[in-house]
Amino acid sequence: MLLQRANKYRAEPSPYQAQAMGQWVGACRHEYNHALERRQYEYRNYGFSLAYVPQAKELTVRRAAKNWLEFVPIHALQNALRDLDDAFSRFFKKLCGHPTPRKKFKNDSFTLPAEDVEFKRLNKRHGAIKLPKIGWVRFRGYRPLGGDLRSVTFRRKAGEWFVSVLWQKKRPDPSKSTDDPIGIDRGVAVFAATSVGQLIDPVNAFDGIRDKLAKLQQRLARKVKFSSNWHKLKGKISRLRMHEANVRKDFLHKEATGLAKSHGVYRLEKLRVRNMTASAAGTVEEPGKNVAQKSGLNRSILDQGWGMFATFLSYKEQERGGRVEFTPAPYTSLRCPAPGCGHTHANNRPTRDWFCCEVCGYEGHADVVGAINVSQGRILPVEPPKRIRRRVGKRKPVEERVSHGA
């Protein structure tokens, strides 16, 4: 099997290097948006869309005519065009929506191939990557690569620079696991419960920053928009949200690794998180009920990172020869798992944490019972991701929207 992974480091560029890389991400974003506009223009007026090759030839002409593009490595600009080409390929396969323009501070990245860079270790905790035209850029948290270097991606996030070093390695296929499936029931009060009785408490990363975030947002609302102080507070909020995301991702990685090491086959519910976190606000004519409670539940569900956890567990199991299967989600927490019973009713859960079958008397922790039902459930076939449908048309007038909606 071909193993592809990326090591992520925090870069420490000098002020000159940071300024140069800022110009590079701006140029890549500009060329991406220009190429997108050209494709849309050709399709509207002539009925066909441009491909990567003719746009790469146009890039060569544009780069010779514009002095500010000559300082940017050509491969970084070409990779931006390849990203656009990949986005259109996924769009034509109905895997995602139509590509949209990239935005500043949101899509600040550039990618260089392995032949344009050099990678070396400086000391135990630091390394460096040599980029064309600006020299060696230091980074922290050195870890050796596990295979051959493929590409390097620099990304600016919350005012900090990060570098992802992609490497690949061929290795023999691991022996497939023959273990019995272990069910996992994901929740909010209990992040995950397994069918063998293991309970994993949630980390609730958002609760750790909620009060501080509210104060910063209140201060931001009093600032003049786009002023110097407004940008300073915006940076603080961005760094706080990045800390929240890092805490959640670290927790999910550790829990997924522990589960992958302990067993070979897991079964999860196929959850529709987007539908589960839909707003309950309703409309003016038909207002929703318990809007505040539903909003809090939505926030708690999104704070858990269920989808990211399933992704992490899937690829960690694949590395070890295991697999992750999915089963239908309805009634897993209400059905009795006792052999020969299977009674399904809401009265089987007299409390949120406890399950008691009203027919046979089977008792147990409600989340563990749900995990047992998941382990015994029907396996769903692997389906390609569905196209993300974007809402088209004008928004409703202000008077038709509920003020406390999402």
Image (cartoon, grey):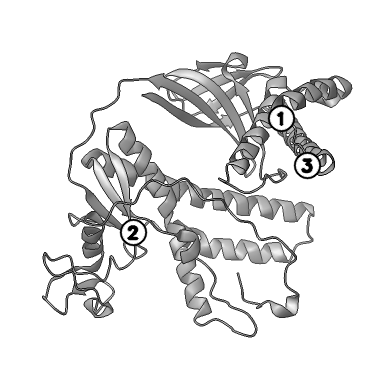
Looking at the image, which residue sits at the far front?
Answer: 47
Q: x, y (%) of residue 303?
A: 46, 59
Residue beneath disc 2: 328
Query: Residue at image x 70%, y 30%?
Result: 81
The earlier-in-sequence mark between 2 and 1 is: 1
Residue type indicated by callout 2: Pro
Q: Is 355 drawn above or below residue 37 in the view shown? A: below
**Disc number placed over residue 51 in the picture, else none:** 1
C-alpha separation, residue under disc 2 versus residue under disc 3: 40 Å
SS of the residue under disc 2: loop
Q: x, y (%) of residue 377?
A: 25, 57
Q: Is residue 145 visible?
A: no
Residue type indicated by callout 1: Ala
| Residue 174 lies in quadrant | top left
| Residue 3 lies in quadrant | top left
Q: x, y (%) of residue 138?
A: 57, 24
Residue beneath disc 3: 40
| Residue 133 lies in quadrant | top right
Q: Is 180 drawn above or below residue 14 in the view shown? A: below
Query: Residue at image x 59%, y 14%?
Result: 115
The earlier-in-sequence mark between 3 and 1 is: 3
SS of the residue under disc 1: loop
Q: How many marks?
A: 3
Quarter of the figure with the C terminus: bottom right
Q: x, y (%) of residue 355?
A: 20, 72
| Horizontal side, residue 332 vs residue 91: left or right | left
